[in-house]
Amino acid sequence: MKTRKLIAKIGQLLEGGRKSKGPDRTSLEELLERLEEKEAQLAAKLAGEDDEDKAAKLRMKIKLLRAQRNKGREALESMR
């Protein structure tokens, strides 16, 4: 799944949780795993990147994914 879709999906889960009964715990855990995998893929890609512009874009995506994972983790902990 592309980065944008992952971020949009976690946003929907977190925002949707405020409107209804809350996000489903298992789907949130699954999405957090996907975000972690995507972050690892981007980190591996960053390690092999020589172009500074592309590396900066990858670092920004990694930073964004990390922030979304943290939000998701906080939401998951609040469900417990």
Image (cartoon, rainbow, N blue to C red):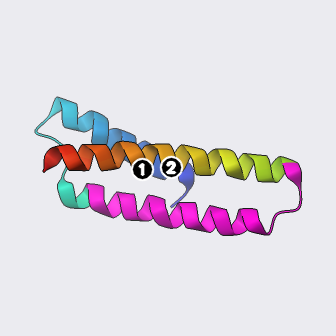
**Marker count (numbered):** 2
Identify the mark at residue 69; answer none if there is no mark. Answer: 1
Of residue 4 and residue 74, the one placed in the foreground of this image is 74
Res. 40 visible in picture: yes
Q: In this view, does 60 lie above or below 41?
A: above
Of residue 3 and residue 36, the one placed in the foreground of this image is 36
Magenta region includes residue 33: yes
Disc 2 designates what residue? 66
Residue 67 image point, x, y percent: 48, 43
What residue is shown at x 59% (from left), y 46% (from top)? 63
Residue 51 image point, x, y percent: 89, 56
Residue 76 image point, x, y percent: 24, 50
Of residue 71 and residue 11, the one placed in the foreground of this image is 71
Tell me the amino acid under the disc marked 2. Arg
Quadrant location of residue 31? bottom left
Res. 23 visible in picture: no
- Judged from the image, the secondary structure of the residue bearing numbered disc 1 is helix
Q: Give the range drawn in magenta.
A: 28-52
Residue 58 image point, x, y percent: 70, 52
Label 1 neighbourhood size at 10 Å, few (<14), some (14-19), many (20+)? many
User: In terms of secondary structure, what is the magenta stretch mainly?
Assistant: helix
Label 2 neighbourhood size at 10 Å, few (<14), some (14-19), many (20+)? some
Q: Is residue 10 above or below residue 35?
A: above
What residue is shown at x 43% (from left), y 63% (from top)? 34
What residue is shown at x 50% (from left), y 49% (from top)? 66
Tell me the amino acid under the disc marked 1. Arg
Residue furthest toward the top?
Answer: 19
**Alpha carbon distance from label 1 to label 2:** 5 Å
Magenta region includes residue 30: yes
Q: Is residue 20 left or right of residue 42?
A: left
